[in-house]
Image (tube, rainbow, N blue to C red):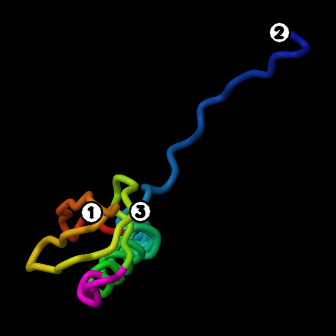
Amino acid sequence: MSLFISNAYAQSAGAPQGGGMEMIIMLAVFGLIFYFLLYRPQAKRVKEHKNLVSSLSKGDEVLTQGGLVGKSLKCQKKKTSLKLHLTIQTTSLFRSLQ
């Protein structure tokens, strides 16, 4: 028997662990955290982007995801034509606009 090491004794068998209700509460809390921290902000950004694209008209200045800045020449169903410089025109999809 050492002075610094204590003896280890086995515990007696206690009551069975009830994990059913606690598990359901924990899953509900994780679901709420997922909803408020991940899903809701992303849905809000998608809604704002849809409003931005629907209000886009000829002559609006836009920024693409690739970093190109230009003025909208014409807006079609899923894409727009951009004027980048005096002689440079390009076509961009709406989903790539910021």
Question: Which quadrant of the rendered structure holds the C terminus?
Answer: bottom left
Mark nearer the viewer, 1 or 3: 1
Residue 40 highlighted magenta (yes or no): no
Q: Which residues are magenta?
A: 53-60
Q: Residue furthest left?
A: 77
How many residues crowd mark 3 within 10 Å: few (<14), some (14–19), many (20+)? few
Q: Nearer the viewer, residue 26 or 91?
A: 91
Q: Position of residue 53 (x, y in %)?
A: 26, 81
**Label 3 belongs to which residue?**
18
Local secondary structure at mark 1: helix
Secondary structure, magenta segment, majority class: loop
Q: Which badge, 1 or 3, comes first in the chain's sequence?
A: 3
Q: Earlier in the sequence, mark 2 or mark 1?
A: 2
Is residue 45 something one can see in this rendering? yes
Q: Is residue 36 above or below residue 92?
A: below
Q: Amino acid at mark 3?
A: Gly
Residue, disc 2: 1
Is residue 61 toward the left or the right of residue 7 in the image?
A: left
Which residue is pictured at 31% across the width and 76% down the height? 46
Q: Is residue 61 above or below residue 51?
A: above
For the question of whether residue 31 can be seen, the reply is no
Task: Tell me: 11 left or right of 58.
Answer: right
Q: Residue 8: x percent and y percent?
A: 69, 25
Q: Residues within 10 Å of mark 2 (few under 14, many from 20)?
A: few
Q: Amino acid at mark 2?
A: Met
Quadrant of res 42: bottom left
Determine which residue is flagged by label 1: 96
